[in-house]
Image (spheres, helix red, strand yellow):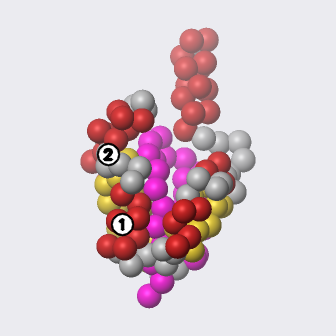
Amino acid sequence: MKKVITYGTFDFLHNGHINILRRAKEYGDYLIVGISSDEFNALKGKKAYYSFEQRKAILEAIRYVDKVIPEHTWDQKVEDIKKYDIDVFIMGDDWKGKFDFLKEYCEVIYLPRTVGISTTKIKTDLNQFLKNG
């Protein structure tokens, strides 16, 4: 069985998220998704609208996702790769090169992001919409 892992916050789930999950699953038989815990988001200076448990439940309902695990630190990726016997690590290409150090443990692939959509864009658009009524 070929195992794949990816990470993210996955707040305000959108078609870009679905696309990366679908494409990540195409690289293996079993997809694990690490999602940032609320505490880890706070350390990164990010605030998710949905709690960790809510984001986890949403991801678990997606057919491409086989397992959801919490991400507590930047450094846990090597641990997770070893623990879950990961073959392929996948991230969006906005992270290109940042995780190349993982190549000694598994294959590392950066997938192109879906054009025109991001959680940041959704938040900006919503703020603009609310501001202009």
Which residue is pictured at 41% across the width and 50% down the height?
74
Helix, strand or loop under label 1: helix
Q: Amino acid at mark 2?
A: Ser
Identify the magenta region.
1-27
Q: From the image, which quarter does the C terminus lie in?
A: top right
Q: Report if residue 53 is visible in the image.
A: yes
Q: Are marks 1 and 2 in contact (CB under 8 Å)?
A: no
Q: Residue at x 57, y 33 (%)?
A: 120
- Residue at (59% x, 25% y) in the render: 124
Give the farthest residue toward the right.
Answer: 115
Q: Which residue is mark 2?
A: 37
Q: Can you identify the residue that label 1 sits on?
A: 80
Residue 77 in which image quadrant: bottom left
Picture coordinates of residue 123, whole percent (x, y): 54, 29
- Quadrant occupied by the N terminus: bottom left
Nearer to me, 16 or 132: 16
- From this view, report whether residue 90 is shown above or below residue 28: above
x, y (%) of residue 108?
A: 58, 68
